[in-house]
Amino acid sequence: MSGSPYSELAAAVSSLRQQVSDLHQELVRYDLVVWTAGNVSGRVPGHDLFVIKPSGVRYDRLSPDSMIVCDLDGQVVEGELSPSSDTAAHAYVYRHMPDVGGVVHTHSTYACAWAARGEPVPCVLTAMADEFGDEIPVGPFALIGDDSIGRGIVGTLGEHRSPAVLMQNHGVFTIGGDARAAVKAAVMCEDVARSVHISRQLGEPIPIDPGDVDRLHARYQNVYGQPARPVPATDRGARP
Ligand SMILES: [Zn+2]
C-alpha cells in the first residue's frame, strides 16, 4: 500500500500528531499556559482535517496518540478523548482562512492584561514590526459555545497583518502557515506585550513611523524563511 493516498494521509496525520503534541511543550517552556488552559492545532496539508489537543489533559500527559483529529466542522474523526473546548474556534479559522495551517490559543499573562483592558498593543518595537507588521489588535468579546470566537478572530485578523489577536476579556489567538509558526507568534506576542507594558511604566513609548513598520515587516518576512502568514499583495516583490 506504500504510496497510496490512504497511506500518505495516515503518514501526514501521524507526523502532525507528533508535531502538535511536541509544540504543546513549547507553551509550557515559554510560560504561556497554566494547568490545561491553552492549545495548539495544525491543519493536515491538503486535507480538510486538523489535529488538536484533547480537552482537560495535563501538558505532561500529552502524547502523539492522545491528539484528536477533527474535520473542519470541528467533529471528531479520530481519537479517544474529547477535543479541546476551543475546537469550534480553531475549525472556524481553518474553514474561513484557507492559507492558515496552524492555530494557537493561550491565556498568557501580559497579553491577557492588555486583552482585559480591550487595548491593542501599539507597534513601538522593531521586533513587533518584524513579526506583527502592526499593532496587535483586539477582537470582540465573545462567549464560548458557538462560532462567536471564530468569527471574532477571522473578522479581526482579516483586517490586520498581525498573526495574533487579543480577544477582549479573554486571551490570545494566533495563526500561522503551520502550527510551529502559530506557536512562534504566541511566544512573540507575550514577549512584546510584556516589554511594552514595562515601557509604559516608564512613560509613553515612542511610535514607529508606519512607513518604517512596513519596511521592517517586508524585510523580515522575506529574509527569514517562510512567512508566518501570507504576505499581503502590497508587500510582494519587496525582496531586494
Ligand atoms: Zn481561552
Image (tube, rainbow, N blue to C red):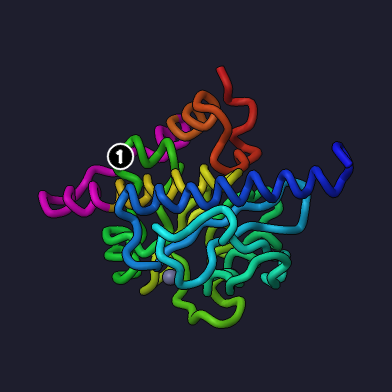
In the image, residue 212 lies in the stretch drawn in magenta:
yes
- Which portion, as a residue range, is magenta? 194-215
Where the C terminus falls, by quadrant? Answer: top right
Residue 155 falls within the magenta-colored stretch: no
Looking at the picture, tell me which residue is in the foreground, 8 or 173.
8
Q: Position of residue 11 (x, y in %)?
A: 73, 44
Q: Residue at x 54, y 41 (%)?
A: 228
86 vs 98, left or right, is left
Could you tell me how many numbered marks the image carries?
A: 1
Q: Amino acid at mark 1?
A: Leu
* Displayed-image quarter of ligand 1: bottom left
Q: Residue at x 35, y 37 (%)?
A: 127
SS at badge 1? loop
Q: Which residue is mark 1?
A: 125
Residue appearing at x 58%, y 51% in the figure: 102
- Give left or right: position of 180 versus 116: right
Of 227 and 62, nearer the camera is: 62
